[in-house]
Amino acid sequence: MRPRGAEDVQAAVRVCIEHGTPLVTRGAGTGLSGGANAVDGCVLIAMDQLNRIKEIDPVERLAVVEPGVVNDDLRAAAAEQSLWYPPDPASSPWSTIGGNVATNAGGVCCVKYGVTRDYVLGMQVVTGTGEIVRLGRRTAKGVAGYDLAGLMVGSEGTLGVITEITVRLKAKRTAETTVAGYFDSIVQAGAAAAAVVAAGVVPSALELVDKHCLKAVDAWKNMGLSAEAEVVLLGRTDTPGDGEATTMLRCFEQAGATWAAMSTDQEEADALFSARRLAYPALERLGPVLTEDVCVPTHRIAEMLGRIEAAARKHDILIANVAHVGDGNLHPLLITPLDDDSARARAQAAFEDIIGDALRLGGTVTGEHGVGLLKRPGLVQELSPAVLDMHRAVKKALDPHGILNPGKVFA
Ligand SMILES: Cc1cc2nc3c(=O)[nH]c(=O)nc-3n(C[C@H](O)[C@H](O)[C@H](O)COP(=O)(O)OP(=O)(O)OC[C@H]3O[C@@H](n4cnc5c(N)ncnc54)[C@H](O)[C@@H]3O)c2cc1C
């Protein structure tokens, strides 16, 4: 169904409770963990009709939006008033604010500006008992009661259906300087990223893209991107002056960059960033892609990238890499030829090795994509039985009939 208001959602929830029917909420369906996949016999609620930006308040610096608003549309509307909505998942041209909130999406600039959670002030939610409630606030501060709006952020449609969201905005940002570096190996590029963080630089973006991604984007969009580098590291800073850019450049060179420069060519810099954004869809053209999303402490980035390379060799699998490397959030993309069951089995084994390695290095199984279906086994590896019981208790309290996105996140 395609609701036009919270009352439509409420009516759907009540019917689902009466009939014991599962209800799955869907934003744009760009999620990479299967969270919005339909389950047998479910009602699927698609949020595309709930797509109004209801308010942008330049004085309070906030926006009130319906959940189906596309991320880039909110950013464009905010920009018209010299304001900025920072969370910028690489899917921002397509993904919705509701989906971003339900997955606590990260993005390119979150290394400096934080993730979706940092911008959610309040929301309207239809609960698993069919009530329409308001959670959170519009004020800059507020500690009345438990942070139930915060609990909904990242809950992947399992605790309520979000029907309106109030987000914090920032003043329009200053221009960024880009620093690009070419490396012969992802391990060197990872070491350069860790060195940038250790040097106290807080870049406004620090992204890694390897040659498999660049070639796939070139083959698709013919953007004429460099095939000279095995790995490209893209740093950006919006701190005035060239101090941070100079430090980044030095870190890249000391870590062994074969070429590094501050970009004077904005068009070239933008092309490299758009290649990073297009990496997933470009690689999907090569065959089914198993998408990883591990996140490790920054001083472990190079070691983790080395282990990913080792997993590719051990299991004889093509693994392409993009990464929000400044936060240690790595996206090895395991590509298998169509209809090759043996390759799929090897990819699955590599996937499991990578998860195990990330946990051993003090990381997490999902930095930003969410658990959905894909990371359910990983969640059990990461959380203790007592913490999983806490999750089940919260779920039972807020969704006593068990109708909201059942089988997702945990069984
Ligand atoms: C090319 C590409 C690049 C990407 N880059 C990033 C990135 O940089 N950072 C990042 O974090 N993710 C990224 N993603 C993953 C994805 O875009 C995000 O997870 C995004 O937040 C999902 O939004 P969506 O609107 O597509 O939600 P969907 O995929 O439709 O749903 C995601 C989850 O949210 C739930 N949900 C959706 N709307 C609601 C609602 N109104 N109420 C309650 N639950 C709801 C669904 O049930 C599901 O569990 C990328 C994906 C692609 C395809």
Image (cartoon, helix red, strand yellow):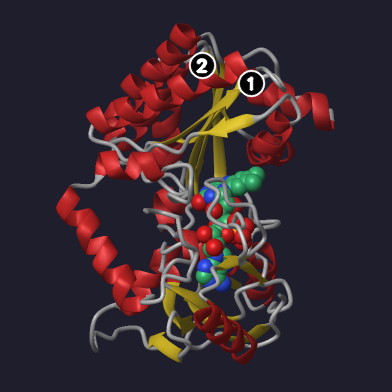
- Is the distance from the Cβ of mark 1 to the nearest ligand 1 atom less than 8 Å? no
Instruction: Specify few, some or many for label 1: CA neighbours under 10 Å numbering under 14, 14-19, or 20 or more.
Output: many
Residue 317 image offset from top left, x and y in percent: 55, 14
Q: Is residue 256 visible?
A: no
Q: Looking at the rendered structure, which numbered label has been put on residue 6?
A: none
Amino acid carrying label 2: it is Arg
Residue 247 image offset from top left, x and y in percent: 39, 33
Amino acid carrying label 1: it is Thr
Question: Residue, x 45% and y 60% (percent of image)?
Answer: 104
**Quadrant holding the C terminus:** bottom left
- Is the distance from the Cβ of mark 2 to the nearest ligand 1 atom less than 8 Å? no
Residue linked to disc 1:
336
Residue toward you, 242 or 111: 111
**Quadrant holding the N terminus:** bottom right
In this rendering, the answer to whether 314 lies above or below 291 is above
In the rendered structure, are the residues bearing label 2 and label 1 in contact, judged by CB atoms less than 8 Å apart?
A: yes
Left or right of 362 on screen, residue 124: right
Residue 314 image offset from top left, x and y in percent: 44, 8
In this rendering, the answer to whether 278 lies above or below 92 is above
**Res 377 → quadrant:** top left
**Res 230 → quadrant:** top right
In this rendering, the answer to whether 388 lies above or below 268 is below
In this rendering, the answer to whether 80 lies above or below 268 is below
Determine the CA span between mark 2 and mark 1: 9 Å
Q: Is residue 110 visible?
A: yes
Residue 384 image offset from top left, x and y in percent: 18, 47
Residue linked to disc 2:
346
